[in-house]
Structures are given as C-alpha cells and as structure tokens.
Amino acid sequence: MSAEKRYEEYGYVLDFLPHGRTGARAGYRAGALVQLIGEEYFTLLEATIREGLTAKAGDRLYVGKEERKEVTYIMGRIGFDELTTTAKMELPTVIEKIILNREGWFINFFNTAQAITPRMHALELIPGIGKKYMWQIINERERKPFEKFDDLQTRANIPSPAKLIAKRVLEELEGESKYRLFTRAP
C-alpha cells in the first residue's frame, strides 16, 4: 500500500531571510530564503528564492512541481521549532488568511464532520467548541447546511469560526495534538 505523495501548490511567506540562515543549516544553500506555510495542507517549508527578489509576510508564492517564477529550490519541510521568531509571529495571521480564502472547504468540514471515537466528535477538537456548541452545529446543519462563516456564526452562535480553526491549525503545527484535522503529520 503506497501512500500518495501530496505536494503544496502554493505557499504563503512567513519570513524572508535575505542572507539565508545562520546556524544549523547555514551553508546548505547560499542566498535568500523564505519560510512558508502551504495553502492546502498547512505544510511548513523552507525555500530559496531568485536572486534580487524580496518577499514579505503574507505573499503567496507558487511552490508546485511546474516552473516556478520566484522560488528556485524547495529545501524541504521544517518543524514548528525551526521557524524564526518573525515566522512564528506571522503564523496566526497567515493561517487565518488561508482559512478565509478557503472558506468553502472549511464550511464543508463543519457540514460533514463526524465522530472520531464513540466519545469524541471532530468538532470538539476545535478550541472553543465543546458539547454544547457541537450539538448546536449538528442540529443546525441537519436543518440546512451552512453556506458561509457568517451563517455558521449566526445560527450556531459560535465566535469567529476562522479564528477558532486557526487556533486548531496552530496547535497541530506545534505538535500538541493527538488528532490531525487540517495538517499533515511531520
């Protein structure tokens, strides 16, 4: 049984290091580096970019298999602990931006999420959603599927869904969770 390799097509810049990295990976590849988070699987990546280019936090860059305009080489996946301080500070904002851009996908999650174990529902893994909100979401989606975050927020009476999902993604990236809803295992 071979697991299909899944690659990111686009990544969002978390930090731009014009002179590369100092320390452990220094000298691995000379030149400017970017630390990115993937748009689809929230994969943390490090890559080199074309000479003379600069990037700022939140920029969306193509990192797929075809010819890349800005990124020259994907150095590989990195762990949360390998992110720079700046990248860690940008992470919550960029994650929320990705979630808002993929609203339909996340609304579908709320409309279709199931129990993970007999005692725990996938919805309960999202910070701020306990049994009470879980049942409100389930009851409301049975009446009519949610269409947008605003709809979910109003009908299920939960605070900002994008912020709650962003907290969950961050927990998964930090390695603090047994179950993964939105990220790939390292």
Image (cartoon, grey):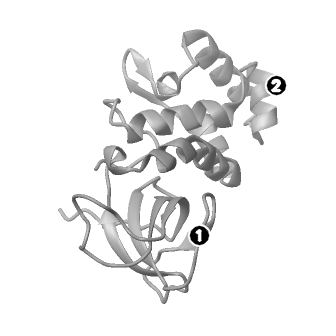
Please determine whether, in this image, residue 54 is positioned above or below residue 185: below
Dot 2 lies on which element?
helix
Label at residue 55 = 1
Q: Nearer the viewer, residue 108 or 169?
A: 169
Camera sees residue 39? no
Instruction: Residue 111 in the image: state x and y as whole percent.
Output: 63, 37
Which residue, given by chain and number where applicable, does mark 2 sit on?
154
Dot 1 lies on which element?
loop
Amino acid under disc 2? Thr
Q: Is residue 46 left or right of residue 23?
A: right
Q: Residue at x 25, y 58 (%)?
A: 23
Q: Nearer the viewer, residue 85 or 156?
A: 85
Farthest-out residue, top: 132
Q: Nearer the viewer, residue 114 or 91?
A: 91
Q: Residue at x 79, y 23 (%)?
A: 155
Farthest-out residue, left: 1
Q: Residues within 10 Å of mark 2 (few under 14, many from 20)?
A: few
Amino acid under disc 1? Ala
Instruction: Residue 69 in the image: state x and y as whole percent.
Output: 55, 86
